[in-house]
Amino acid sequence: MAKNKKSTVLVFDGNQRSSLAVTRSLGKIDNTTVLVTDSGDSALAGNSRYCAFFLKCPSPQDYPAQFIDWVKNAIFEHGITHLFPCTEITSQTLLMNQEALPNCILPFPSIDTLQSIANKHRLLELADKLNIPYPKSIYYKNVDEVNLNTNFQFPLVIKPSVSNLWIGDRWINSAVSVARDIEDLKAQLKDEYFSHGDFMLQEFVPGHGAGVFLLYNKGEYVAQFSHKRINEKPPSGGVSTISESVIPEANLLSMSKQLLSEAKWHGVAMIEYKMDGSSRAMLMEVNTRFWGTLQLAIDAGVDFPRLLWEISDNPPKPSIPVTYKVGIRLRWVLGDIDSFYLYLRSNKYSLTQKLKRTLTFLTPSLWRTRHEINRLDDIKPALYELKIWLKDLIR
């Protein structure tokens, strides 16, 4: 977009940490106004100094039709030029109704292209074509196809094909889970999702996760990033509370580029792998949205939101970073406090491990660590988050 042309960006899902990172990034661009929306009365990103003002919208999950009507009116009323959703439900709801929206930039591919990699079964079909390894999987169109007398090897991963299933008038949430035995499998297959959606039963692959973050412009590679997780919430595996920028492993980067190039991808994507004991990479899934530790990539020198904004609407070629800073750490303070508390309470860890975790918690690497939410030049989101955290703590 030309530098002298004004733009107004509507950032959705304002309570997501990624939404705050997007708001801070785009709010620093000249001639760009950032509005933030969420279904609550206030939101994390809505408290940022880079947010011109906050708008309350209907929930895209609970009231999708009303949400789309609201977006239409907001585009006209506020002169919105760009839509930046930060969750799968919001982005897919917008994409499914894109033709009904006024002329506005939504930096995603078509809904079918998105589903070609967001749908885990379709992703594995693409992986087959490209000879990319993934765990052994059995596909089922519905729960009635499962023969519970099969000699399954446990633990067994239950993997819905989509994280959020649209059934015509509403969304059904799902999640990947692990069945420990046949009774556990039977119980989990009673979930509402399996009455409507397809899924896979997949071999359990032990090891650690690894991911590659990429930006594509209409099928062409633009930028990359990778990190490793230092702490997670819960400690056994979950949301990253401390992460560190690293160079992506060459084979992971190569496979990720093959997938997105073949899919003719546009926008951002996070490709996740599991590394087994022999350092063999297994493809797990692709997240077609901004990720939780987006701020780390920005701090390290890869400003994904700004780059995505720059490649929109046939602009001049963006200034793409050739490299980024390695060893930069990002800490989500309140999340890390929760993680530390859960670690100390768990009986999975020895006294020595807990003492070591306490030492690292109390003595973080200050010289290379930045706080994700707590920023002196934009402190209100941290105060807002602390208020919500304390309310939850005393309930």
Image (cartoon, helix red, strand yellow):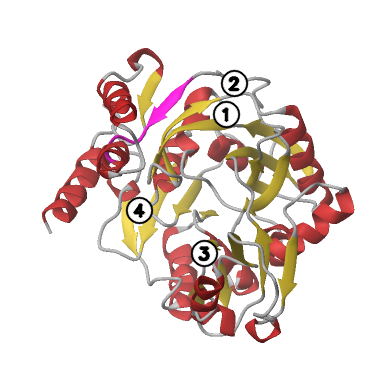
Q: Range of the magenta residues?
A: 328-334
Number of the label disc, if any, that sits on residue 175? 3
How far apart in space, not on screen, are marks 3 and 4 (Cα)? Answer: 20 Å
The amino acid pointed to by label 1 is Val
Q: Which mark is residue 324?
A: 2
For mark 2, give the secondary structure: loop
Which SS class for mark 1?
loop
Q: Nearer the viewer, mark 2 or mark 3?
A: 3
Crowd around label 3: few <14 · some 14–19 · many ≥20 (10 Å): few
Q: Position of residue 319 (x, y in %)?
A: 65, 26
Q: Which mark is residue 15?
A: 4
Could you tell me if residue 103 is visible in this image? no
Q: Quadrant of the N terminus?
A: top right
Residue 378 picture quarter: top left
Query: At label 3, which amino acid type do we have?
Result: Ala
Lower position in the chain sequence, tag 3 or tag 1: 3
